[in-house]
Image (tube, rainbow, N blue to C red):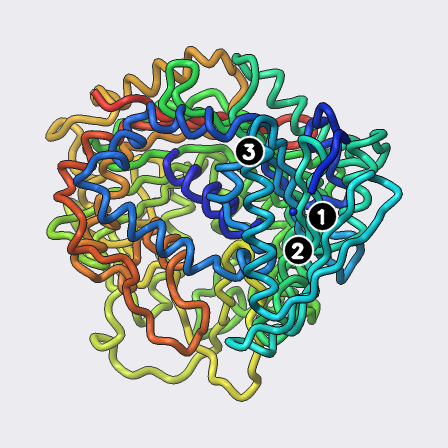
Amino acid sequence: MLRFWTRLSVWIVGVFLFVGSSFAQDVRPVENLFPNTTVGFVATPDFEYLDNQFNKTQIGCLMADPVMEPFAKDIRRQFKNRFSSVEERLGVTLDDLRKIAGGELGIGRIRPAPGEAALAVVVDVTDRVDKAVALLERISENLTGQGAVRTMIEVSECPDPVIKFDVPAPKSDPRAGPRQTFYCLSGKLLCITDDMKQMQGILAGAHAGRGDSLADVEAFQAVMRRCVADFQGARTQLRWYIHPLSYAEAVRTATPEHDRSKGKPLYEVLAGQGFDAVQGVGGFVDFASESYELVHRTAVQAPPPYKLAMKMLVFPNGRDFAPQRWVPRDIATYSTFYADILNAFDNFDSLFDELVGEGEQGVWQDVLEQLRDDPNGPQIDLREDLVAHLGQRVTILSDYQLPITATSERLLFAIETKNEQAVAAAIQKTMEADETVRRRVVDGRIIWEIIEEKDVPEVPDVPVIDIPSIMPGDDLPEQEEEEEEEDVRLLPHAAVTVFHGHLFIASNVDFLLKVLKPIEERETLTRSIDYRRIDAAIEQLGISQKCARMFSRTDEEYRPTYELIRQGKMPEAETVFARLLNRIFGPSEKDVVRQQEIDGSKMPDYDVVRRNLGPSGMIVTSENDGWFFKGFMLKKE
């Protein structure tokens, strides 16, 4: 759950980031001011209340503890450095907005048309007009000091003038080119944007309303309506919305061309594969609310019918989510969900052809035929011999091993089987054809372990499929025909076996052996107090239909990453959370050697931190027009 808030916070700070008369006596809800071309939006009705509620949580108390101040200060510095381009673009920081917000604050990224992008900030400055005026004066002084030309523009939409600044290209990066920013303070409303048309539309909406606002977008309405239906409070502390593919396009458009990744943008690939069926994603986030430390609701609006690879996303609601008897008690996270695996396999071909075959059709089919017919290969019909014998329930476990190193995190995937013997036979044929796999027998069970390449005898070259590394928000990497393809394994030290009616794939053999340990020799997860607390809280949600359910001991989940930061080894970390932080704080230039930006020497012992991290849980429901997520974090006891 903490990971969810971290990502959301990064999105708010990193992505979106001025005199007045009697106009706009009562500022309308900000979604009624932003245009219907808004593709990313976040708003809070009361920034001060949001801040106070966060401070009531155990995490908020932790960050306010003097022992954490050096670390917290360093984190704030890294955020400011990382997203300084936003401040340069609008001349305002999130901290500036926090100080002047007397009512609602909304920040939005707008895509007026393909190939166009804009940013806009709308603030209700009730009882803080003097602070807003002071902010505008400071901005004006700063921009004119940079050589900007200030112009007052009279507009029909508002009795107050719009202040325009023509800002020259920064000396530090002349390639960025000149820019324009616009500010207008009218009554209780402050609007900041980099596009004059958006300024006029927002001002017109504030005066007379507009029929083309974000609030009029059907997907926005559906997402908010779904979250409201589950909400227990009077008003949420934070609400957000995003149109994923359009948002990605707007971000790329706003990025200077010399800083963009080359090759076909990922959002174009996904749109072509039917993922534009996801019309909107959004929800609510609340702190110290409804007996939770944190509770979030997220709705995905994606009404069928689907086409091409989007058809893979079928997650049936299931009945049994109890941890299997082989799940150990002392794990960090446990997630289980239902997926139509055979359906996903049958609809994977077009996506594979697009990503790996660069649009050439039939590449995936060639791979399947090679696996089936190559006399030097496993000679397996992947669909009929393996996938058709898999069930629909998938379980994922994680933990770590001591001492903490860059590779301490351990993962295990377990897929239910319908025919254990058939799956075992298919796995054996596949593994025996791979020279990098070693067969082991432990307690009468066959385990297939991938071994280091240095231990493998030289073998003739075989065709290798190079799957690009694609992270959310990235563009597809440029394909160089001259480059030799590399075989990059997702789990380079994996261990595989079939047992307990499941296909097990673990990141290393030690974790697999821990899971396979005789049940009578250890306790299971269902005996854990943390799990029982989350289980009881999930039952109290009263949501009977579920396709997924998650449990996390956040104090255990984030320990490896924390310890690696303390050791100054963050760039080497291979934990999931560490990869996220490396993306946030790592250098933006690909050629720069990664160095840890956070000073780990200032961080206290982890025991100081873990006592503030309670367990978390989440459920997901498949619905007729998409999915609904609800998650929470409990207090640490």
Q: Which residue is mark 3?
A: 101
Q: Closest to the observer: 558 or 351?
A: 558
SS class, disc 2: helix
Residues at marks 1 and 2, CA–CA distance in whole angstroms: 7 Å
Quadrant in the picture for residue 147: bottom right
Mark 3 surroundings within 10 Å by alpha-carbon count, few (fewer than 14), some (14 through 19), many (20 or more): many
- Label 2 or label 3, whichever comes before in sequence order: 3
In this rendering, position of residue 246 left or right of residue 75: right
Q: Quadrant of the N terminus?
A: top left
Q: Are marks 1 and 2 in contact (CB under 8 Å)?
A: yes
Q: Which residue is mark 2?
A: 270
In this rendering, position of residue 284 left or right of residue 164: left
**For the point 57% across and 85% down, which residue is it?**
481
Please name the amino acid that badge 3 sits on.
Answer: Ala
Q: Which residue is mark 1?
A: 276
Residues at marks 1 and 3, CA–CA distance in whole angstroms: 35 Å
**For the point 76% across and 47% down, which residue is it?**
199
Q: Is residue 506 above or below residue 222?
A: below
- Label 1 or label 3, whichever comes before in sequence order: 3
